[in-house]
Amino acid sequence: SGAHFFFGALAEDAAAEAVMRLYFLAGDSGELCTVPGAFAPVESLYKQHVWLPDGRVIYVDGQGKIILLSPCSDQGIDLSEHMPEPFTMIGAYAPETGRLLLQGDQSYWLLDGLASGAEPALRQITGVAPNPYDLHWDTFAWLPGGEEVVISHLNGRDASGGSTLYLA
């Protein structure tokens, strides 16, 4: 089987509300597959999705829903009902362990187990909260091996306050 590509496009629903339609493009056949349903719009797909090793995609929509999608399948799993708060983006993904760093409005969370097929486990990171000024001011990186993640948190609205590094 060939590679798949994932992309989204803004559209209008029957009530003329903006929605995001999602698609997979099958690399081997050229088939364009529409993901069933309409999703809350996001500015771009950057930091909103990640490919898992088994070919599935985790997607965070504009309302903070987390959906697990399989290419060219009608089967999507809404993981949001198991989540304590809506999420704004996927901060970082560790392919070695399958762990995700998720950013919510109030806190950061580690999500584990999706890549291995195990029951998803969610753990809140305490001691650091997302920068309230802008979604993109904090940056993230997994250490080699994917067991620990570093959060670089900007102290204030500009660089004059410096940054603080957190290890989780």
Image (cartoon, rainbow, N blue to C red):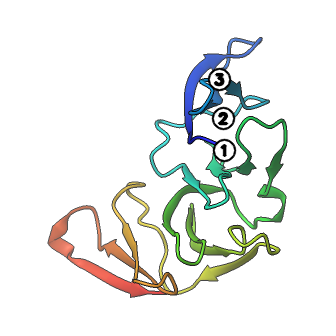
Amino acid type shown at disc 2: Ala
Amino acid type shown at disc 1: Gln
The answer to which of marks 2 and 1 sits earlier in the sequence is: 2
**CA distance for labels 2 and 3:** 21 Å
Q: What element carries label 2?
A: loop
Residue drawn at x 63%, y 27% is: 29
The answer to which of marks 1 and 3 sits earlier in the sequence is: 3
Occupied quadrant, residue 62:
top right
How packed is label 2: few (under 14 Cα within 10 Å), some, or many (20 or more)? Answer: some
The answer to which of marks 2 and 3 sits earlier in the sequence is: 3
Residue drawn at x 40%, y 83% is: 144
Report the residue marked by disc 1. 63
Residue drawn at x 52%, y 70% is: 95
Q: Is mark 1 on a helix, strand or loop?
A: loop
**CA distance for labels 1 and 3:** 25 Å
Q: Are marks 2 and 1 in contact (CB under 8 Å)?
A: yes
Task: Tell us which disc is closer to us: 1 or 3.
Answer: 3
**CA distance for labels 2 and 1:** 6 Å
Quadrant in which the N terminus appears: top right
User: Residue 25, percent across and down?
Assistant: 60, 30
Report the residue marked by disc 2. 40
Which disc is residue 43 wearing?
A: none
User: Residue 60, percent across and down?
Assistant: 62, 49
Is 72 positioned to the left or the right of 124 in the image? Answer: right
Q: Which of 80 and 100 is in front in this view?
A: 100
